[in-house]
Amino acid sequence: MDCSNYVDLMTEYMEGDLSAPDQNLWEKHFNGCPNCKDFFRSFESSVELINYVKTEGCPQPVRQRLEKVLQDRLNLPIDG
Ligand SMILES: [Zn+2]
């Protein structure tokens, strides 16, 4: 997996939706990846948005839109 995959998982990670092995994998990559750490810092301002999404039951379109924003910020190609 490259960074875009981890960005993809970031929302799920923050929502606690990842399985334990996936969570470990994510943390392992994140801890060794300056790119993702950098991104996460800029992403923190979006945490409120995520919390909102969580409280509102995370409608699929909102999640997709959020993921798009995150991917645009990382400037990575998106597949699927
Ligand atoms: Zn990364």
Image (cartoon, helix red, strand yellow):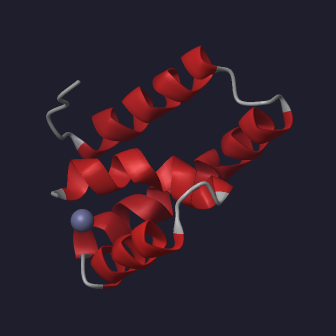
Q: State the residue at coordinates (48%, 24%).
A: 64
Q: Is residue 38 left or right of residue 50?
A: left
Tell me where residue 32 appears, x and y as whole percent: 25, 84
Residue in the foreground of this view, choosing between 75 and 8: 8
Q: State the residue at coordinates (41%, 67%).
A: 22
Q: State the residue at coordinates (49%, 22%).
A: 65
Which image quarter has ligand 1? bottom left
Give the position of the C terminus as an image quadrant.
top left
Tally the marks: 0
Tell me where residue 13 appears, x and y as whole percent: 54, 59
Please tell me whether residue 11 is drawn above or below residue 35 in the rendered image: above
Residue 1 falls in image quadrant? bottom left
Q: Is residue 63 left or right of residue 9?
A: right
Residue 62 falls in image quadrant? top right
Tell me where residue 61 appears, x and y as whole percent: 56, 15
Residue in the foreground of this view, choosing between 24 and 8: 24
Tell me where residue 5 appears, x and y as whole percent: 27, 50
Q: Is residue 53 left or right of residue 66?
A: right
Q: State the residue at coordinates (47%, 71%).
A: 23
Task: Residue at the far right: name it.
Answer: 55
Task: Residue at the far top: name it.
Answer: 61
